[in-house]
Image: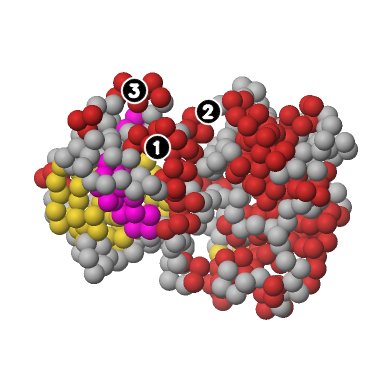
Amino acid sequence: AMINYLALLGWNDGTENEIFARDELIEAFDIDRIVKSPSVFDMDKLKWVNSQHLKQMEIEEILDLVEEQLNFMDMINEGADAEKKRDFVFASTAVAKQMMETLQDAATNAKTVMGYNLPATFDELADGSEAKEMVKQGNFYGISMKLMEMHEGKSFPMPNPGDLLAAFVDGSTKKGIVEDRQTGGDETSYPQEYKATMKSMAKEMKVKGKNLFHPVRLALTGEMSGQDVPKQLSLLAMAVGDGSAVNAVAAGVVPIEARMERLKSFCESIPEEFRVSKTNAGGDKGKSEKGSKKDANGKKESAASSAAADSSSPAQDDPLSSYEGPPITALDIRVGRINKVWTHEEADKLYCEEIDVGEDEPRLIASGLRPYLSEEDLDGRMVLVLCNLKARKLAGFPSHGMVLCASNEDHTEVKLVSVPVDAKIGERVSVPGFDFEGEEGKPFAENKIGKKKVFEKIAPFLKTSEYGVPEFCGRPLLTSAGVCTSPINNGSVS
């Protein structure tokens, strides 16, 4: 990774490619492609290059290196059982692999997972924080009380001590999984048992999507974001089991029993006004005002029976109900207009664009669209621009943002997302069902978008419908002038 990065200081191969193996660099290097502009050593870029190389490696290739980091932080007991130690190292690597920029990240992430940062009282949460605002919505209290009730009654599923790697291994291939959205094990394993419990809770408490998953995550892990909860609980189980390989003191392990005690203390401190769901109160308002509605035969149907019928309807397959990633409001997607476009002198696939997004000065953005679109396709077009990306140089060109496009499955066809002609330059794109105006709706800072891999986590859920409408979890991307569109049906948006 270091050799790869150093080679990019003042050189590129004329394409968008920035990741090279050593042999590929030797083959691609041409002294005529050394750029004239001065180089700047960027530690963030070096870490990004390193992360790309780590992603290309198999879990097994880096286990020994991750074990070194865990030992360096004194997180493994001396003389620990070899098999239990290997399982812990494997799980720590697998759960962190997609977010790792350095090998040390696997160890620090494991320590975060095994710890529990939920404060003892509501007042200790930072004012304006994502966690405090979520608790104020009212779902957290009821869901937490249910979780504690289930834990006390031993009905809440916990990892099987005899198969703690289930969450990290594909049940059919027996290979390690690294994508957070992938579920480990088979239909009888712990991850499926946890998933079934969440569905049951959603139906019983009449809450779903982020209104369920965010409270559950905070209650069980003490964090508002992170990896898949079953994976986190499985890693925790490795740290508290009999003869564990983990040095619980050095790793800051907080067992599930201690978590429930702190959660109880926290819930007792939540003000009464935040113990009732504002979401359900608002959503049921219309029903309560009408009292009841008639069924197909003209008979009156109570609001309760109506809700029960709705909960068993196909709407339960709503993709948002199982989404656990960052909120779509984290992205600052704005309407822009391409004022000027030209080809990059040294990169064969790049266009350079000057785009007005409603700021004092137009943005400079590089896009790898030359294989798919002509300059005429871009010049003067209204486009969607992801604006809260950190500025970085692409083949020496300072690029600050990304033009959103739709592509087909094999990426042989790429088209711009079309914006309604009456949309306003600089306006922020919204999605129905999400509050883009309040404090919670503010886009994430550029550094957080990059460091937390926010766009990478949201991107798999940005798709075009069968009618070519760009959507997030089935909800269209909207401007003040209407819905955005695309000539590509059933594609992806990035």
Residue 216 placement, left or right of 28: right
* 130 up-or-down from 58: above or below: below
Residue bearing the label numbered 1: 5
Q: Which range of residues does the magenta coloring cover? A: 386-411
Is residue 176 visible to the viewer in this orientation of the structure?
no
Q: Could you tell me the amino acid type at mark 1?
A: Tyr
Which mark is nearer the camera, 3 or 2? 3
Q: Name the quadrant containing residue 48.
A: top left
Residue bearing the label numbered 3: 26
Q: How many marks?
A: 3
Does 158 appear in magenta? no
Q: Few, some or many C-alpha atoms within 10 Å of disc 1 (few <14, some 14-19, many ≥20)?
A: many
- Disc on the earlier residue, 2 or 1: 1
Residue positioned 81% across, 47% down in the render:
248
Residue positioned 64% across, 46% down in the render:
109
Residue 429 percent coordinates (x, y): 34, 61
Q: Few, some or many C-alpha atoms within 10 Å of disc 2 (few <14, some 14-19, many ≥20)?
A: few
Residue bearing the label numbered 2: 57
Q: Spatial distance from mark 1 to mark 3, Cα to Cα?
A: 14 Å
* 180 up-or-down from 308: above or below: above
Q: Could you tell me the amino acid type at mark 2?
A: Met
- Disc on the earlier residue, 3 or 2: 3
Q: Spatial distance from mark 3 to mark 2, Cα to Cα?
A: 20 Å
Quadrant where the N terminus lies? top left
Which color scheme is applied? secondary structure
Does 406 appear in magenta? yes
Q: Could you tell me the amino acid type at mark 3?
A: Ile
Q: Secondary structure at mark 2?
A: loop
